[in-house]
Image (tube, rainbow, N blue to C red):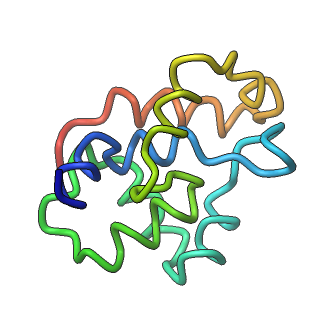
Amino acid sequence: MTLLQIAEKFPPNICRFLARKMHGTKPMSHSDLAEKTGLSRAGVALLSKRKSWRGVPIERVVGFSEACGVSLTNPKRTTEFMRRASKKYLVGANKTQRKFLSEILKAQPA
């Protein structure tokens, strides 16, 4: 399986949904991800709404997914987290974050 095939299993909206900080207890903000990726906050928001990596440079795919805590070289760990985690970190989200996280799971392909 190629890196791009693995990346498509974890599209930008899923990576963004899984992005956590403070030892996994709170979701990351746009500012947190912007700092880690070098993108603007608006760039993070736009990329977060996409349901596919199609058209995104591979460097950005790897950088964004790693900043979100998704390892494309070891996808088993992320898959296990998705399967078993109780998503307790969402409790630490503020109202705006909860609304955005809900929206990105409904987002149309970009």
Residue placed most toward the observer, 25 or 50: 25
Residue placed most toward the observer, 13 or 42: 13
Residue 16: x %, y % from top left = 50, 47
Relative to 82, is 43 above or below? Answer: below
Residue placed most toward the observer, 103 or 21: 21
Residue 70: x %, y % from top left = 51, 51
How many discs mark residues in the rendered view?
A: 0
Give the residue at x 79% y 24%.
91
Give the residue at x 39% y 69%.
62
Q: Quadrant of residue 87?
A: top right
Give the residue at x 86% y 50%.
22
Residue 55: x %, y % from top left = 13, 67
Relative to 78, is 106 above or below? Answer: above
Residue 29: x %, y % from top left = 68, 55
For residue 36, side relative to residue 79 (left or right): right
Relative to 51, is 35 above or below? Answer: below
Give the residue at x 31% y 46%.
11
Q: Residue furthest bottom?
A: 38
